[in-house]
């Protein structure tokens, strides 16, 4: 009996796939990551019943059955945990917030939005990071809002109970300081911190629910636009632009690029991260 | 805890335009024009006026709102509103119109005419539009264009797109093109690269 495992893509086919993925999603894979891609490609070819690379590539290009999302899912890490991509948190305190504080109306807080916030790890991470790493927090009001379309995820975020895996990147001292053990393998965010983050329902492609959140100085919108279709990405970018104050920043996931989605934002390359800024000059209100 | 959270007594101020920038498509304030554009219902009747606004709009954020509105309207009306901008003297507008047309399935019906346009620059842009169309139809149209094309640049644009969307039935057309433009080494190189991609490196290289 012969094996049903699809044949390995040739070097030219691999390059064709990489070109497509880069153009479509911004994900970049060099030949050095050939093995990583090959394994996931073989799994997707098997899952879709594609006997050859051309068969699979035609399916991918047509996005039959949402195949682009399936492949991208297999090529990216899809889990959330505290202090994920903490280089952006370092960028927040070292490069972004000083400008935001200088721009703000003194009586107004600096507003930070985590969208989608899923079960709350990101907005709570931002809060802990600021409390631990940003001395001006003692003098500057900061308002953190976490939003998601998934009301079950929002309920979990408000509960603030997490397992060991979610906390794996937090130093033990921070777990002790900001969590109460609530079970053998679960920890709950302390009341004071839970009560300082507002959770709201919002759909990134709905201007009304996005507009209802007000304007923000910084938006974290990580690892979601990559899964939208072109039209939804475009509408989401418009909504995010309107949700930022002029000069405000947006942080995307490491595999995402706003430049591929919309020309509305300016690229800002900081030492810790690449972020995108609504131009300062278009303040009209 | 030095973090603040709003409650019922201090509601979130909405991000809607303030009274000083009321939505108005003819306002000198770009934010008011942008707001007016974003409030337009996505009806085909809006496509013509949006296309005319696009020709005169210089603010990037308003221009993007117009293009997104046209993309939401979609269909023949949006395509008709966008096509004239492929001939704009403004490179950014040409590029933006192209990207938006790529996202509209109705553009496919216009592709044969665009690939046969008398302006070679339009044929180059049309090849790029074909990249986003259904592969089988687009590849056949690009092969037809290459077969009759007299200029090397539109051929090169089509070859580059075929490297992604083409199938084995495109290889003879590419080989013939390489022969016709033997004095254009860059085109021969592009055709060899495209042929290798299409065949997965399994077919003999085109000369």
Image (spheres, coloured by chain):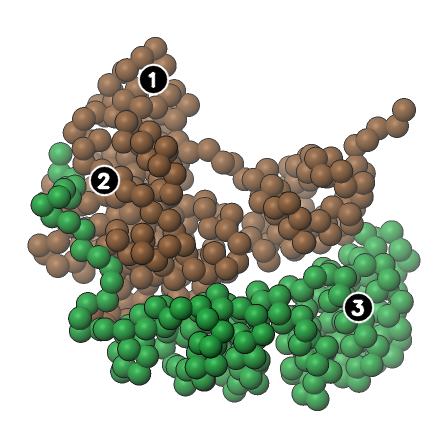
Q: Is residue A200 left or right of residue B200?
A: left
Which mark, by number, is residue A198? 2
> Residue drawn 33% across and 29% down?
A156
- Position of A142 relative to A179 (above/below): below
- Cα separation, mark 1 vs mark 2, equals 22 Å
Q: Which residue is the site of mark 1?
A: A186
Q: Is residue A136 left or right of residue A222?
A: left
Q: Position of residue B99 (x, y in %)?
A: 55, 69
Residue A130 occupies quadrant: top left
Disc 1 is placed on an element classified as: strand
Given the image, what chain letter belongs to the residue carrying mark 2?
Answer: A
| Residue A108 vs residue B35, the one in the foreground | B35
Q: Which residue is the site of mark 3?
A: B140
Q: Is residue A121 visible?
A: no
> Residue drawn 24% across and 70% down?
A283
| Residue A42 vs residue A138, the one in the foreground | A42
| Residue A20 vs residue B188, the one in the foreground | A20
Q: Which chain is brown?
A: A
């Amino acid at each position: 009996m012969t094996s049903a495992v699809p044949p390995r893509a040739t070097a030219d086919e691999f390059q064709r796939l990489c070109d497509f993925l880069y153009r479509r999603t911004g994900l970049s894979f060099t030949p050095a990551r050939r093995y990583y891609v090959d394994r996931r490609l073989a799994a997707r070819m098997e899952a879709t019943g594609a006997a050859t690379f051309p068969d699979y590539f035609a399916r991918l290009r047509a996005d039959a059955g949402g195949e682009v999302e399936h492949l991208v899912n297999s090529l990216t890490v899809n889990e959330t945990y505290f202090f994920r991509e903490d280089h952006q948190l370092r960028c927040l305190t070292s490069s972004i917030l000083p400008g935001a504080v200088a721009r703000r109306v003194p009586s107004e807080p600096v507003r930070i939005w985590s969208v989608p916030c899923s079960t709350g790890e990101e907005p709570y991470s931002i809060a802990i990071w600021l409390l631990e790493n940003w001395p001006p927090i003692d003098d500057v009001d900061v308002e953190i809002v976490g939003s998601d379309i998934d009301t079950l995820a929002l309920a979990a975020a408000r509960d603030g109970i997490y397992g060991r895996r979610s906390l794996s990147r937090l130093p033990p001292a921070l777990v002790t300081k900001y969590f109460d053990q609530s079970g053998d393998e679960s920890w709950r965010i302390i009341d004071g911190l839970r009560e300082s983050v507002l959770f709201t329902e919002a759909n990134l492609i709905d201007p009304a629910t996005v507009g209802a959140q007000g304007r923000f100085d910084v938006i974290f919108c990580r690892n979601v636009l990559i899964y939208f279709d072109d039209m939804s990405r475009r509408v989401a970018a418009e909504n995010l632009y309107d949700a930022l104050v002029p000069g405000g920043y947006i942080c995307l996931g490491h595999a995402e690029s706003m430049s591929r989605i919309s020309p509305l934002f300016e690229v800002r390359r900081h030492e810790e991260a690449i972020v995108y800024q609504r131009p300062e000059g278009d303040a009209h209100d | 805890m030095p973090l603040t959270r709003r409650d019922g007594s201090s509601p979130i101020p909405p991000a809607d335009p303030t009274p000083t920038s009321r939505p108005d498509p003819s306002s000198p304030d770009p934010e008011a024009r942008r707001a007016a554009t974003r409030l337009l219902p996505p009806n085909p009747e809006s496509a013509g006026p949006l296309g005319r606004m696009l020709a005169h709009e210089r603010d990037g954020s308003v221009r993007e709102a117009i293009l997104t509105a046209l993309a939401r309207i979609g269909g023949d009306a949006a395509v008709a509103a966008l096509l004239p901008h492929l001939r704009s003297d403004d490179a950014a507008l040409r590029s933006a119109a192209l990207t938006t047309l790529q996202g509209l399935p109705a553009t496919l019906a216009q592709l044969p005419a665009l690939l046969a346009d008398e302006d070679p620059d339009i044929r180059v842009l049309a090849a790029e539009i074909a990249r986003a169309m259904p592969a089988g139809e687009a590849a056949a149209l690009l092969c037809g264009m290459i077969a009759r094309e007299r200029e090397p640049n539109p051929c090169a644009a089509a070859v580059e797109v075929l490297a992604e969307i083409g199938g084995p039935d495109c290889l003879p057309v590419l080989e013939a093109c390489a022969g016709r433009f033997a004095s254009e080494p860059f085109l021969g190189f592009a055709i060899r690269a495209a042929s290798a991609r299409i065949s997965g490196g399994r077919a003999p290289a085109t000369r």
